[in-house]
Image (cartoon, rainbow, N blue to C red):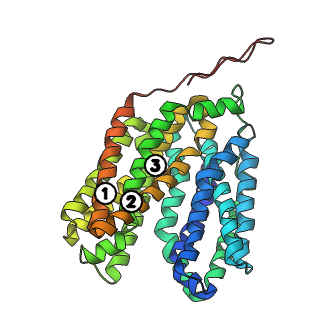
């Protein structure tokens, strides 16, 4: 069990590294390809679009399949497509590939979470989710700086070759240790859709969209905020970002325990922590000490809500949990896009501090939304029809 969870963590870690690798090497890639930074930035958008749209779509289409072959296929496609830049593919081909990479990444996340929660006792499902999700938090803390160093030393294309080798290793081990997880009987594909997209599930997804939008509105512009407002400069900015990544890693693992203790309550407390951190940055962020403390708290609370949110969404989806497992990643990417856009527009109007104010407002609204959704309960699984009976209608 521990080995299987470790392999699932390794899979999300490698996928997370491939995501942050582009952000860490934008200038290197742009210079080598002789294109503007914005053109290379399309790789980030393509990956996000793939996760947001392709992930749930592929999960829906494979909902009736055993999770093991789904996991292995997703990881194999991810490995193969990341070979393109290593073998010299141009920017256009890589952008197209990143859409598919994002889609299979979303599929892998959903299948990995379903697999992880199926091999642990019910009272440890939140911690199992946290193991899978934490791969992304750890990749953000160590993948970007290491990828940058590697890119500067041997070139950006070689960095992707390292990702491919790591993914191939994860695939080989997964072939040996990941167990079969047959699809749950009794709920057909359209039933999955009805349960996973029920109003109660969409309401909790909206809480996460607001939270991620608030976090993204601040995180996207942390470097200029630290330099222009908090007065942090030089290598201290890098140290702050590393501290933020490490704090997010701690929060991601801790969130699993809070999810097991009570996901609805943990989501509210995490939202309060995010809102308070952003309010501290907005009100007193000109003080470097306050800015650093608020930044660390934002990292812990922002990552800490991920597992409770995932747990809550799947719990409310009931029999539609297989499809619902893909929705938080999709909604989180939507929130990131909304937050980055809102923060950018705020900067145009009132400068960098305005982006932090917008972030704090979004996070505060998410607190109210989390409290409102606390009383929501999942629907019961439909009764299996007797021979000759029509299939019972599902509740929503």
Q: Quadrant of residue 284?
A: bottom left
Q: Which is nearer the eye, 115 or 235?
A: 235
- Disc 3 crowd rating (10 Å Cα; few below 14, some 14-19, many 20+) is many
Residue that mark 3 sits on? 306
Quick one: SS at disc 2? helix
- Residue 274: percent from left, percent from top: 32, 52
Tag count: 3
At x 62%, y 22%, the residue is 394
Q: Label 2 vs label 3: CA separation?
A: 22 Å
Residue that mark 1 sits on? 358
Quick one: SS at disc 1? helix
At x 52%, y 65%, the residue is 139
Q: In the image, is residue 81 above or below residue 33? A: above
Residue sitting at the far right: 388
Lower sequence index among marks 2 and 3? 3
Q: Nearer the viewer, mark 2 or mark 3?
A: 2
Q: Which is nearer the eye, 247 or 197?
A: 197
Q: Label 2 vs label 1: CA separation?
A: 7 Å
Quick one: SS at disc 3? helix
Q: In the image, is residue 208 above or below residue 155? A: above
Circle 2/circle 1 CB separation < 8 Å: yes
């Amino acid at each position: 069990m521990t080995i299987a969870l470790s392999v699932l963590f390794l899979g999300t870690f490698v996928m997370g590294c491939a995501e942050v690798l582009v952000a860490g090497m934008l200038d290197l890639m742009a210079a080598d390809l002789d294109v503007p930074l914005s053109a290379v930035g399309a790789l980030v958008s393509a990956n996000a679009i793939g996760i947001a749209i392709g992930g749930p779509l592929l999960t829906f289409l494979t909902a009736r399949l055993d999770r093991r072959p789904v996991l292995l296929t997703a990881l194999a496609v991810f490995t193969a497509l990341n070979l393109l830049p290593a073998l010299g593919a141009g920017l256009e081909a890589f952008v197209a590939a990143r859409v598919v990479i994002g889609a299979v990444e979303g599929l892998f996340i959903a299948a990995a979470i379903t697999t992880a929660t199926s091999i642990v006792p019910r009272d440890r499902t939140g911690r199992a989710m946290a193991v899978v999700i934490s791969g992304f938090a750890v990749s953000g803390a160590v993948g970007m700086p290491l990828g940058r160093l590697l890119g500067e030393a041997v070139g950006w294309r070689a960095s992707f070759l390292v990702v491919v080798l790591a993914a191939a290793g994860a695939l080989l081990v997964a072939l040996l240790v990941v167990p079969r997880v047959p699809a749950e009987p009794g709920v057909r594909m359209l039933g999955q859709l009805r349960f996973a997209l029920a109003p109660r599930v969409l309401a909790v997804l909206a809480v996460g969209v607001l939270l991620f939008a608030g976090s993204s509105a601040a995180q996207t512009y942390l470097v200029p905020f630290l330099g222009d407002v908090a007065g942090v400069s030089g290598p201290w900015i890098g140290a702050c970002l590393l501290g933020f990544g490490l704090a997010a890693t701690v929060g991601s693992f801790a969130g699993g325990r809070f999810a097991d203790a009570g996901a609805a309550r943990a989501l509210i407390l995490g939202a309060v922590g995010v809102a308070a951190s952003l309010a501290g940055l907005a009100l007193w962020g000109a003080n470097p000490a306050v800015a650093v403390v608020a930044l660390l708290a934002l990292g812990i609370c922002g990552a800490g809500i991920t597992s409770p949110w995932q747990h809550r969404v799947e719990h409310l989806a009931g029999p539609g949990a297989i499809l619902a497992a893909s929705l938080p990643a999709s909604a989180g990417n939507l929130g990131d896009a909304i937050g980055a856009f809102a923060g950018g527009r705020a900067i145009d109007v009132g400068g960098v501090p305005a982006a932090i104010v917008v972030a704090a407002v979004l996070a505060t609204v998410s607190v109210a939304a989390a409290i409102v959704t606390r009383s929501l309960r999942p629907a019961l699984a439909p009764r299996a029809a007797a021979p000759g009976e029509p299939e019972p209608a599902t509740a929503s």
